[in-house]
Amino acid sequence: MPNAKSLRVLVVDDEPLARERLLELLQREPGVEIAGTAEDGIAAIEAIRTRRPDLVFLDVQMPGKTGLDVVREIGPAAMPATIFVTAFDQYALRAFEVAALDYLVKPFDDERFEQAFHRARRLVELQEMGALREQLLAVLQGTGESSPRANSSRSAGESPYLERIAVEMRGKVRVVPVDQIDYITASGPYAELRVGDRTHLIRETMQTLEERLDPRQFIRIHRSAIVRLALVDTLLRGAGGDYEVQLKNGFKLPVSRSRREELERRLGVMP
């Protein structure tokens, strides 16, 4: 039985700020020993095997090997207690809920962290790892893919697309309904969600957002822009052959040549 006064914790996340946030919260907890950190799935696998932590905070969306890939490679029988960390709280996480696993949705507040951490600590101290490993196996079998986007656990009639996104605003977590988003633009490794006159920053790729948003409502018009189709007012052609869309609020966004035909089709523009 792990020593209740010394819980060894490994933090796995490809975002430096996310790792720092977890480490800061863990330092407030008594009897916690940091077993190390890892910034990708390959490093996580090595750290779990060599450092043998009691508990792992494991990011789901990582380049290369995802969090579920890590669990698959380690194997449920050898996997420590695990708290999944993810940017999305839509249908993929329902698999974790059904399996009674805990997770944190970025950005999370102190109270939510404490709830997940104390529950995991209790499982470790009570040596309930057998049940936990069975639940991990259920998650892997339930998703059927090494990606949090698998939808085999989705109930009939349930939307496979994002309905809300958690964002941080002034130190608080706010849930933004997707049906309030006007458009999304890329900003380095981040995406900016435009909601009316407000902008919210999240760390997610445009490719992932394109896959997770309902294509009946949104269309990607440029490598750096996704727009709500209903808000497109005018398709503009510049002198050099470049295109833009003008939204109903007057804002303009670029349209790449490779995506122009699809946009015209979706807008009902006749050739």
Image (cartoon, helix red, strand yellow):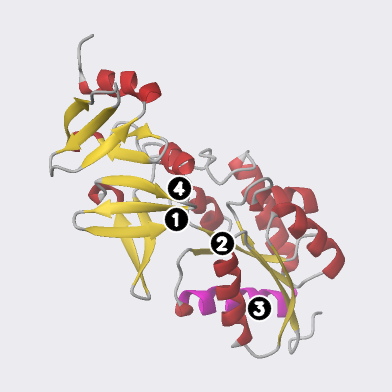
Q: Which sits earlier in the primary sequence, circle 2 or circle 3?
A: 2
Look at mark 1 in the image and give the residue it sits on. 89
Determine crowd level at label 4: few under 14, some 14-19, many 20+ residues with C-alpha closer than 10 A.
Answer: many
Residue 119 point in image, percent of width and height: 59, 75
Q: Which residues are magenta?
A: 112-127
Amino acid carrying label 1: it is Asp
Q: Is residue 38 left or right of residue 177?
A: right
Q: Is residue 163 above or below residue 15?
A: above
The image quadrant where one finds the N terminus is: bottom right
As helix, strand or loop, the secondary structure at mark 3 comes to helix
* Disc 1 element: loop
Magenta-span inclusion, residue 123: yes
- Measured as percent of width and height from the top left, residue 94 is found at 49, 52
Q: Which residue is mark 3?
A: 121
Q: Of the residues shown, which amino acid type is indicated by label 3?
A: Arg
The span from disc 3 to disc 4 (Cα, nearest Å) is 26 Å
Tag 1 or tag 3, which sits nearer the N-term? 1
Q: Look at the numbered disc 2 and give the secondary structure of its residue.
A: strand
Q: Amino acid at mark 2?
A: Val
Inspect this view and state whether residue 175 appears. Answer: yes
Asked if labels 1 and 3 touch by Cβ distance under 8 angstroms, the answer is: no
Mark 2 and mark 3: Cα distance apart in space: 16 Å
Residue 59 covered by magenta stretch: no
Of residue 193 and residue 240, the one placed in the foreground of this image is 240
Q: Earlier in the sequence, mark 3 or mark 4?
A: 4
Q: Disc 3 or disc 1, which is closer to the eye?
A: 1
Residue annotated with mark 2: 85
**Which residue lies under the disc numbered 4?**
91
Q: Vertically, is 54 above or below 165?
A: below
> Is 234 or 14 nearer to us in this picture?
234
Circle 1 packing at 10 Å, graded few (<14), some (14-19), many (20+), is some
Mark 2 vs mark 3: in front: 2
